[in-house]
Structure formats: structure tokens, C-alpha cells
Image: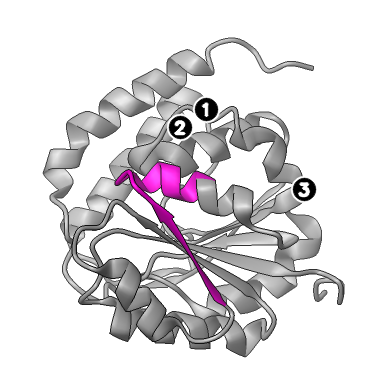
Amino acid sequence: MLPAPTSRVSVVVPVHNEAAFIPHGLPGLVRATRTVYPEAEILVVENGSTDGTAAAVRAAAGNGVSLVQLAEADYGTAMYRGMTDATGDWIVTFDIDYFAEDFLRRLEDTSAEADIVIASKRDPGSDDRRSAFRRLATLGFNLLLRTLFGSRVSDTHGIKAFRAAATRPHLDLVHSRKDLFDTELILRMERAGARIVEVPVTVEELRPARSSLLRRVPRTLRGLWSIRRLLASPPEP
């Protein structure tokens, strides 16, 4: 079933110090989006860049792409701002180096029955072409979600789509910033009864990871423990 003709899609893309990659990544992202949703709103949220990322976005964006600039370098804050500014019925979150036209087509097939659609790297139908170490890290993170929160979600990082009407009441409740903003948002919505559908995805990195996975581990563990404390009380009826 396709979304109703009145449905609009907003795509939120946080970027930080991506001036060198923007000329390649942004046109491809725009093409992939417009192929499926020609009228989609695309919001690029530049946060705290020091390398001319905003100028690169303006040069490469073309018509129909909005640039939001934030002084603070923070992925979670950029996600929050983009999602609150988005005007679509669905809010899709892409990274400049990780986006998928196929996911947008799957959104058309699942949007009638979901509040969140997740492109899960751990779905049985997914083709995860990352290194064995990064696949193991995803598995470990998922085990923590199941152990600490009883979550049934298999992946909270990467490509996702949120039904705006179901998501907006939860945005201001999310305390986490950095790379756990979307994890806390999904956990909160799951606890509130949101309908979550996971779909397969092909995962192929367009470039080497820019940050050390090992360095993120302590911060991630502290962040997950903070979320656990926040969510310790039972959800309101």
C-alpha cells in the first residue's frame, strides 16, 4: 500500500566537517530521494563545522535543499533540530555517506502499518558488507539494548523513518545528545507502544569510518546507563 497522496516526506541530514565529501555525497543523496519522492523536503543540518561545510552545501545543494546551521558540534542536537524543523508527515534520517533509495521505496510499502521504519543491518534479509569487527560491534550494542531495556529493536543506528505525528510528542523528552539521541528516541517510542517495522538494507560503507569505534565504547556505555536510569520508572498509562 502506498502512502496517501497528501503524505510528505522530510529528509534530515546532519553534517559536520564534511566539506570534502559534500560535492560527491549530497548530489547523490538528493537524486536518490527525488527519484522516489520528487517533492521531498531535504534539510541539511550543519553543526559546528570549521572546514567550510556550509559553503560546500550551498554550492552542491541545488533547489529544494534547506541548510540549517548550528554553532555546536553535536550529532544529537543536529538531529533534534532537523526533526523539529521538518514539515513532512514522515521524517527520514540519512547520513551524508549512508543513504538508500531502496529504503525509501520500502517506506512506501510499510508506512501504513508503522510509526517507525528502521533499515536494520541485522535483519535476516540484509547484506551487511562492513568489516567483521563493525558487525560484531552492532551485535554487541543490540545485546545491550535487549539486556538493559528489554527492547525488541535490532538496530537503532543508521537509516530510519519516523511518522511525524507519533514522534513529535517524544522529541523534547530525549535527554541524550551525541550519537545516542536516536537510540533514546526509539526506546521511548517503543515503550509508549509505537508500531516499529524493520526492513532489510544493503550496508556498504562509501568511505572508511571517520571516528574510532573503540574510543566511542566508554561514552556509549555511560550513555546507555544514563538512558536506563531515565527510563527506570514505568511508562505513564
Give, as a three-letter code, the residue at label 2. Answer: Arg
In this picture, residue 120 sits left or right of residue 115: left
Q: Mark 1 points at which residue?
A: 150
Q: Nearer the viewer, residue 234 or 28?
A: 28
Which of labels 2 and 3 is toward the front? 3
Specify whether residue 94 is painted magenta.
no
Q: Which of 27 and 124 is in front in this view?
A: 27
Residue positioned 59% across, 10% down in the render: 233
Query: Up-down: is 4 above or below 25?
Result: above
Q: Do the residues labelled 1 and 2 touch (CB within 8 Å)?
A: yes
- Where is residue 230 drawn, in percent x and y? 49, 16
Q: What element carries label 1?
A: loop
- Where is residue 201 drawn, in percent x and y? 47, 70
Q: Mark 2 points at which residue?
A: 146
Q: Which of 135 and 205 is in front in this view?
A: 205
Query: Up-down: is 93 above or below 215?
Result: below
In this picture, residue 10 sits left or right of residue 5: left
Q: Do the residues labelled 3 and 1 touch (CB within 8 Å)?
A: no
